[in-house]
Image: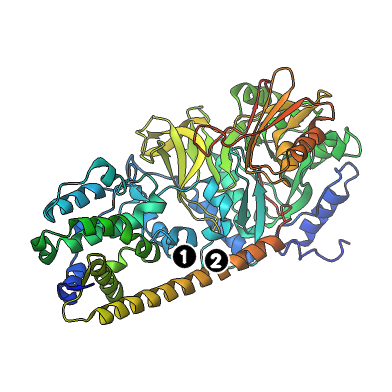
Amino acid sequence: MQTEGPPLETLTRRLAECPADFLAEPRVGSQGKVHVAAVVSDLMRDLGRAPLTLEQAAVFQSKIQRQDRNRLQAVLIACWLLHDPWFLEQKRFAPQAYNFLSRGLNELAKLTQAQQFITDPDRREELARLCLKELGLRPAGETMAQAQDRLATLNTIERQRVIQAARAAEERARQIRAAMAAEAAREAEMKAMRE
Amino acid sequence: MTGFLPTDRFPLITASGHRLLQRLQEHPHAPRYTHLGYNRLTLAGLQRAHDFLVELQTRAGWEPGEIPAWVDEFVAQCYREAPFYRRDGPPPADFFDLPTTDRADLSREPWAFVPDSQPLDDLIIYNTSGTTGHPIDILTHPDTLALYIPLLQAALATHGVTLRSGPDQVGIALICYQKRTYTYAAVLAVLDQAGFVKVNLNPAEWRSPDDRALFLDDCAPEIYTGDPIAFGELAKLPLRTRPKALVSTAMTLIAGLKQSLEGRFGCPAIDVYSMNESGPIGVADPNGEGYLLLQPRLYVEVLDPDGSACPPGVRGEITLTGGFNPFLPLLRYRTGDYAALEYRGGQPMLTRLEGRPPTVFRATDGRLVNNVDISIALRPLTITQYALHQSADGSLRLRVRGADDLEAVRAALLEVFGSDQRVVVEAVEALGAGSDKITQYTSDGGL
């Protein structure tokens, strides 16, 4: 975060205007449409480096939809963000961008539904700030301390929301498990056939 | 004088229903019932069952690659309300990009499929071991179970049979043939207080083996439901009465046995393809061409291992979306059963269905052992998955994943088969070739 990057507003606006191509379903196994590795590879080239090797591409390929769909959707949205002219013109961010897309985004993608990086102002800001941080940048006009503090705040609020939602879900699951335990032997309720 | 009505077990019972219930419970030739029966159908559920019967007159219909109109809203509701689906984020815009689910998902966390808005009153749990090795708990409700009756009526109608039972008549006898199972008598508000009995043809469950025929003849049920193994035993009894139909479920009804049963009872033997997760899915059509789909709000796909739809006529895994159990909305649920989808006049039907073949095991004394008894014996043990095979020489080989006490597993099998049974119990890391789906019971013997 030593270096000043582009104004935050240009990045959050760019996210809000993410085109449909980057929101299409990522290819996982035989499902989905967009081959994410190809999109990342194009980005690497546009950022001034060689396209992905097969080994580098593997991290953006999956057959396990439930595990990887949201992460790959987030990668596509982040690719759109990194196509901002400010990054392209610098021609020096490809290694950091690859690290961000292949590893740095994973934790956030576990907490946040990818679509929220487009629709929710706070999540737009969080993704934009995280992207800048992973590239060693801070938003234009901010000190390093301000940038760090704001990113930490956004992250904490989101974590608390996720924790609260998880608690509510666990409470409902607990109620159902308790009801199941209480009803464990009611197979004598009439059912007309065996299955 | 019939005494107080047992409205705690039968909220909608009438005086005539109570009279029949008492007759079935106190019959001099009745089996030793293991349980009191229940039918806690509510008034709202009764109305729903009547409405459902009307809805079932509309057959499921779609063309290859099409999705019925109701599916979009159903998917949205699942993703809004059921935690298991909601975790995936918003659903893909294209239905065919939805991830599939399977028995392992349901086995791991059945509560995660229950929609947030679903009340938990009068919950019923069915434990099912199935044949793919993942035991599951099915959550359901008396009002949901009552919908099996209209589905049964719809299946019978395809063979020109109408259920007409009412007060003082027994509509359905559900027969089993296994070491032990729940048995009980009930009356059904949905069939205008007609009677229902679930009995086990195992002679040990009766005061006298002769009581089986005497009791069933006196009940004279309009139809029998059961599995092929139970029907094989029923055919041996000296029954004088004739049902209108035999409805076979739970295992494949092999053509030879079907013919033999039809000759023996002078009525159609109707194979219904059904599973606990979804209820009845299809009924074998009278021409033997395949299985007509029964539920208008159950979308059936046939998928290859990658999740792509198989072309019409090509066999793949039967995969379900929809259903009528509000505790278990199914989204692209892989059943573990295989068939092809073919289209006749815009109507999809399942052909070349390969469900669960009936598997016959023999105990050391020559006694027939139903695989259900094996499932029940192994259920209390900590086992992830298992596969049991009986060789032609009678020896057993059990391959088991995740068992913490192999001796306890062996002892449970000896309890079922006899203490001198030859058994090899083998702990394995995996069953099958990288798939969750296995054939749990196999035998070199035939039915």
Vertical side of B20 occupied by A53: above or below: above
Left or right for B25, reference B131 = right
Question: What's the colour scheme?
Answer: rainbow
Contact between labelled residues 2 and 1, with CB atoms less than 8 Å apart: yes
Q: Outermost residue toward the top?
A: B393
Residue under label 1: B81
**Which image quarter holds the C terminus of chain A?**
top right
Relative to B240, A136 lies left or right:
left
Q: Quadrant of residue A103?
A: bottom left
- Residue B324 vs residue A11, the one in the foreground: A11
Quick one: SS at disc 2? loop
Q: Which of these two is toward me, B30 or B130?
A: B130
Disc number placed over residue B172 in the picture, else none: none
The answer to whether residue B167 of the structure is visible from this angle is no
State the quadrant of the N terminus of chain A.
bottom left
Pick out the residue farthest to the left: A89
Toward the viewer: B1 or B121? B121
Tell me the residue at 83%/30% (across/down): B418
Provide residue B395's location: percent of width, then percent of height.
74, 22
Q: Chain of mark 1?
A: B
Gap between marks 1 and 2, in whole Å? 9 Å
Judged by depth in the image, the label closer to the viewer, 1 or 2, is: 1
Pointer 2: what residue? B118
Residue B406 seen in render: yes
Give B158 or B92, whichever is nearer the viewer: B92
Residue B46 pos. (x, y %): 61, 60
